[in-house]
Image (spheres, grey):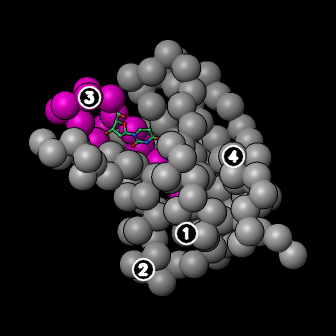
Amino acid sequence: MDLDALFEEARRAASLAYAPYSEFRVGAALLSNDGVVFSGCNVENRSYGLTICAERSALVSAVSKGKRSFTALVIVTPDSAEPVGPCGACRQVLSEFMPADALVCFEDGAGGRITTTMGALLPWDSLHRK
Ligand code: THU
């Protein structure tokens, strides 16, 4: 699996974030189980609550192209000093399309990384039970 390509796509997506309210840019890149990369960025709104996270932006883009399963997700937050994982709402939405063993990696602005799995981020998910 070419994770480097995913990190590059996620960084590029973060540079396109629309985040004038938080000034916190997020980029995400998802790898479909047939090897295609889809990216997304956070898109904020002046109503705040309608903000769309980078992870859901990437996921909706991929599902809109017919992809239904993903083996890896990379999240890049160039404005943070620590790697940032997906919010609770995104974990729930991602779990619909990512198996428990799918890789999830986060990278901060200095290149620090954390690598984990979908199952670790959302344990006891009913969709993942055999
Ligand atoms: N954000 C994401 O896009 N993904 C995350 O995992 C954490 C938070 C966005 C939402 C908002 O635009 C900004 O980051 C600050 O919370």
Could you say whether the residue bearing mark 2 is in a helix, strand or loop?
A: loop
Residue 20 showing in the rendered view:
yes
Could you tell me how far apart the alpha carbons at marks 1 and 4 are, in whole angstroms? 23 Å
Q: Which residue is mark 1?
A: 36
**Residue type highlighted by circle 3:** Ser
In the image, the residue with mark 3 has its CB under 8 Å from the nearest atom of ligand 1: yes
CB contact under 8 Å: marks 4 and 2: no
Could you tell me how far apart the alpha carbons at marks 2 and 3 are, in whole angstroms? 30 Å
> Is the residue marked by circle 4 packed among few (<14), some (14-19), or many (20+) residues within 10 Å?
some
Of marks 2 and 1, which one's residue comes earlier in the chain?
Answer: 1
Task: Read off the magenta span.
Answer: 15-30
> Is the residue marked by circle 1 packed among few (<14), some (14-19), or many (20+) residues within 10 Å?
few
> Is the residue marked by circle 2 packed among few (<14), some (14-19), or many (20+) residues within 10 Å?
few
Image location (x, y in percent) of residue 25? 34, 34
Nearer the observer, 53 or 34: 53
| Image quadrant containing the C terminus | bottom right
Q: Main secondary structure of the magenta part?
A: loop
In the image, the residue with mark 2 has its CB under 8 Å from the nearest atom of ligand 1: no
Could you say whether the residue bearing mark 1 is in a helix, strand or loop?
A: loop
Q: Quadrant of residue 26?
A: top left
Could you say whether the residue bearing mark 3 is in a helix, strand or loop?
A: loop
Question: Does the magenta-highlighted stretch encompass residue 67?
Answer: no
Nearer the observer, 28 or 90: 90
Q: Residue furthest right?
A: 130
Q: Which residue is mark 3?
A: 22
**Residue type highlighted by circle 1:** Val
CB contact under 8 Å: marks 2 and 1: yes
| Residue 65 circle label | 2
Could you tell me how far apart the alpha carbons at marks 4 and 2 are, in whole angstroms? 26 Å
Of marks 1 and 4, which one's residue comes earlier in the chain?
Answer: 1
Image location (x, y in percent) of residue 62? 45, 71
Of marks 2 and 3, which one's residue comes earlier in the chain?
Answer: 3
